[in-house]
Image (spheres, coloured by chain):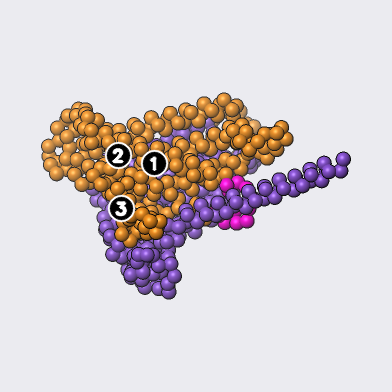
Chain colours: A purple, B orange
Amino acid sequence: MTTLPTSAVAERRSAASRLRARNILLTVITYLIALAFLFPLVWMILAAFKTEAQAFASPPVFWFTPTLENFQKALPAYFPALKNSLIAAIGSTLLAFVLGLPAAFALAVYPTRRAQGTLTWMLSTKMMPAVGVIVPLFLLFRNLHLLDTLTGLILMYTTMNLPLVVWMMHSYMSEIPFAIYEAAKVDGASVGQEFFRIALPLSMPGISATALLALIFAWNEVFFAINLTSSDAAPLSVFIGSFKTSEGLFWAQMSAAATLTVLPVLIFGWIAQRQLVRGLSFGAVK
Amino acid sequence: MTTAPSLATATHAPPAPKRGLRLTPAALIWPALLYLILTTQVPFFMTVYYSFFRYNLVDPTSRPFIGLENYATLLTDPQNLRILLNTLVLAGGTLLLTLLIGGALALLLNRPFAGRALLRTLLISSFLVMPVVTAVIWKNMLLNPVFGFFSWVVTRLGGHPVDWLAQYPMASVIAMITWEWTPFAMLILLTGLQSLPDDQLEAARLDGAGPLQEFQHIVMPHWTQAIQVVVLMETIALLQVYGEIYGSTSGGPGIATTNLPYFIYQKAFAEYNIGLASAAGVITVILTNILAIYLLRMINRSRSSQGG
């Protein structure tokens, strides 16, 4: 029989082409979904370069001559908020590292049953909703004159980021081969020397990844920002929130401010996307 | 220190003289621990304490102890039960949608095709956007009944313009927050898929498993852990949604989109009702912990049954 092999080949060929067609279709679907997901962002960035009239024209304007006018108008109010956001985010990240790095190191290099419990407990503070602590903190801040100050904001953002720093840095520092510490101990290194000379230099990649995440979380935070600041220390989240009642009056300007607010985080986030998974799932999924 | 280890080191080399402050592991842990206790545990116990008083900042001199009356008020008023329900619907609805869409996207991205890495990177964007930005952009530019993009799409399709936030407030808020959280689900679920060894799938295919059987018997069991992580992390985060509601509906119309965090904000910072807000805060913490502990147990159980 000579027909059977030919038909088998033909069948396999058509199966392969069907598979290819299916793959192309799936790829097109993926691109379409991605486009739909990105649309709100694209629309915001486009509006930032439109005139106010174009920004809320109906039917919407897709083709236009870009203008930088909105950015110029948004900048005077944007800069003070930017300064506050930068100080709060960087300050809280630094403080969280000062407190969290030694703890992560000790928990990773001197693991005991109690250390494991401490680690779990620190993580569990993430289960404490901000609303469960905001009332006494607000009253305390009022008495200590910490309301509407960057110090107050930094203190709260540190609380938010500290468990993240401890947990992530613990997972990075646990990966440093134990033999290195042993060798150092034999050479008479103290706990402090092990920390500064071995653990810190060897976990630099982890430190930068963790820092990016902590910066993003502090930058995007809203609840403490709205309830503990009003004007002097108001970060970008509060500034953008003030556009919520704009009712279509300054869409282009709002979009320009929002674009400037979101862009740094987007760029950092894209860079740190792999570490994002580790930080967000606390290492449960790798 | 016992003498044995110091003797052992002494035979190798004389220990370096220790100068200044000697750090112990415990001394390294305490600052972080103390900080977290001071900023989370202490204020929480104060919240519990305040919740037993009739305490309004408008009249700070009178602060009578009223026991559980704040809780009774909260739990008997049908309006407040609506807020509890809103909180659960918002979190549950968003969780379900992000799992479905995020899971589908993860499966779609788990194949080789041109531009996959770029698409994966771009798709995480909405998760990185500040919640308040999401809220003001969606409210003003997408959901606006007159000039909003979605209304224009609906009219182009032959419908009437829709005032989304007034007519379908909860659905609109869920859509918005789903947009934000789908990348999170996608990222975790995709990572879960990628850790599935290829040889397992190949073996199944050689045994003649179809795509559906393959999914049911190989992919799903392996995926369970990633799904559980998404459920746990999102539940904790979504019960605390605040910025999106603050920036879009302010809890309205009426109390249609008021959840517990937004309710507490209104009680504490608009009405200065510290006692009631504290009681609601305690309820939120209890609710979050019950759900989180239940979910954690589920994760641990399935992990130990997998033998790892």
Q: Are marks 3 and 2 on the same chain?
A: yes
What residue lies at 19% left-to-right and 29% top-to-bottom? B69
Q: Which residue is mark 2?
A: B260
Q: Nearer the viewer, residue B232 or A25?
A: A25
Mark 1: which amino acid?
Answer: Leu
Q: On what subunit does the disc labeled 3 rest?
A: B
Mark 2 Cα shell of 10 Å, populated few (<14), some (14-19), many (≥20): many
Q: Which residues are magenta?
A: B108-120
Q: Name the residue beneath numbered marker 1.
A: B238
Residue B4 visible in the snapshot: yes
Who comes first in sequence, dot 1 or dot 2?
1
Amino acid tagged 2:
Leu
Q: Is residue A123 magenta?
A: no
Amino acid type at circle 3 is: Asp
> Circle 1 marks a residue in which chain?
B
Reply above or below: B4 against A95: above
Q: Residue at left 65%, top 51%?
A: A21
Q: Position of residue B217 (x, y in %)?
A: 61, 31
